[in-house]
Amino acid sequence: MQKAKTMVGTPYYLAPEVISNVGYSYPSDLWSLGVISYELCARKYPFEGDSIKTLLSTIVKGSYEPIPATYSKEMKNLIDSLLQNDPSKRPRVDHILKSNLLTSRIKNFL
C-alpha cells in the first residue's frame, strides 16, 4: 500500500507514524478521528506540549488521560482503539460503523 509523505494542518492531529516519517494512509486518518473524538469528550487535546518538539514526543509516547467517566465504556474503548500507536492495531472503518456504540445511536435517529 502506498503511503503519502506530505504534512498539512495542526500538529495536534499528527499520527505517530507521520511523526516517525513512515508516511500515512487510512489508519492515520483514524488516529485523527480519535484525537477529535477525545477532544469532543474531554474538551482538550489528548496530547499537549509547550513546544512542537515536546508535543510530537508526547504523541509518539502515546499516553494520555482517560476521557471523563461520564462517558460510556464503549466510547472510551473506541477512542483507545483509535489512538493505538501501531496503525495496524487501529480498527477499520467498517468495524467502527458496525459497533454497538454507533448502531444503537443510528437506530434512535431512524
Image: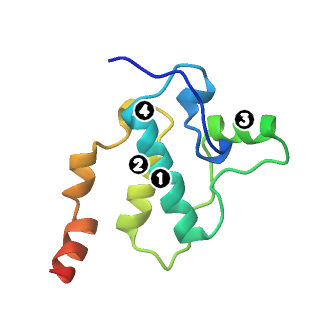
User: Element under label 3?
Assistant: helix
Nearer to us of marks 2 and 1 is: 1
Residue drawn at 64 percent across, 40 percent down:
59
The type of residue carrying mark 3 is Ser
- Quadrant location of the N terminus? top left
Which residue is the site of mark 2?
A: 81
Q: Earlier in the sequence, mark 3 or mark 4?
A: 3
The coloring applied to the image is rainbow
Tell me if label 3 and label 2 are in contact, CB under 8 Å.
Answer: no
Q: Which of the two residues, 68 or 29, is positioned nearer the viewer here?
A: 29
Tell me if label 3 and label 1 are in contact, CB under 8 Å.
Answer: no
Left or right, 40 with respect to 107, comes to right
The type of residue carrying mark 1 is Gly
Which residue is the site of mark 1?
A: 34
Q: Earlier in the sequence, mark 3 or mark 1?
A: 1
Q: Earlier in the sequence, mark 1 or mark 4?
A: 1
How far is mark 3 from mark 4, CA to CA?
17 Å
User: Which residue is outermost to the right?
Assistant: 50
Which residue is the site of mark 3?
A: 57
Which residue is the site of mark 4?
A: 87
Tell me if label 2 and label 1 are in contact, CB under 8 Å.
Answer: yes
How far is mark 3 from mark 1, CA to CA?
18 Å
Up-down relation of residue 51 to residue 99 (above or below): above
Estimate how packed mark 3 is, as few (under 14), some (14 to 19) or many (20 or more) residues with alpha carbons within 10 Å: some
**Rendering coords of residue 11 (x, y %):** 67, 42
